[in-house]
Amino acid sequence: MRRPTLACCVLALSLRAIAAPLTDAELDARVHALSEQLRCLVCQNQTLADSNAELAVDLRRQIREQLRQGASDEAVKQYLVQRYGDFVLYKPPLKPLTWLLWFGPLLLLLVVLAALWRARARRVAPAGPLDDAERRRLAELLDEPPPQRSPRSIDTLPPLSPP
């Protein structure tokens, strides 16, 4: 007995939705809300709602027409994803194809932090005491006489005479 009642309610609601088309204000609100969730394919950093590119205007027109015909928001999104791929969504689904998109920034941050930590560890590494071979080499370097000057050094030039 419950099933016929539920079926009647669903039928009544669906007939009401078909019979009562959206007003222009409601349609504008739905188009705007949906275009805020979609990326402009030309601008790539703006939503469809914010973009004035010809393609964005055309896509908003298509969205409006589909919503006017009674399509749901999800159906419109699926239509655009089938046509343009997941890139059209500002929040693409989490799947193997989009893992780099979702986790790439975090991975890049970890690589940069590891490189900085490693560079700092190399720079700050304390020098240990010298072994015998290093001490002998240092003594040799410190005990060497200064290099010989070339014959044309400044000391061999005659002094300048006053004018």
Image (cartoon, helix red, strand yellow):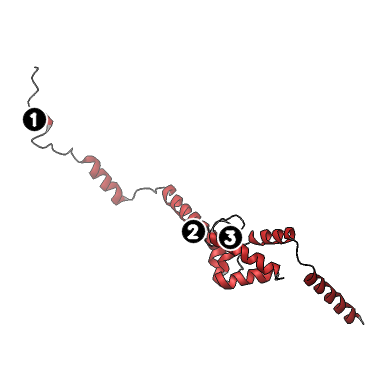
Residue at mark 2: 111
At x 73%, y 58%, the residue is: 25
Of the image marks 1 and 3, the number of the one nearer the N terminus: 3
Residue at mark 3: 57
Question: Horizontal placement of 62 versus 117: left or right?
Answer: right
| Label 2 vs label 3, nearer the camera | 3
Q: Dot 3, crowdedness within 10 Å: few (<14), some or many (≥20)?
A: some
Question: Tag 3: residue type?
Answer: Val
List x then y, in percent, for residue 159.
Answer: 9, 23
At x 64%, y 60%, the residue is: 35
Of the image marks 2 and 3, the number of the one nearer the N terminus: 3
Q: CA distance from mark 1 to mark 2?
A: 59 Å
Tally the marks: 3
- Quadrant location of the N terminus in the rendered image: bottom right
Which residue in the rendered view is the most extreme toward the top? 163
List x then y, in percent, for residue 142.
Answer: 24, 40
Q: Which mark is residue 156?
A: 1
Is residue 80 shown above or below 109?
below
Question: Tag 1: residue type?
Answer: Thr
Question: Tag 2: residue type?
Answer: Val
Q: Secondary structure at mark 1?
A: helix
Question: Horizontal placement of 26 versus 124: left or right?
Answer: right
Of the image marks 1 and 2, the number of the one nearer the N terminus: 2
Q: Dot 2, crowdedness within 10 Å: few (<14), some or many (≥20)?
A: few
Which residue in the rendered view is the most extreme toward the right? 1
Q: CA distance from mark 1 to mark 3?
A: 84 Å
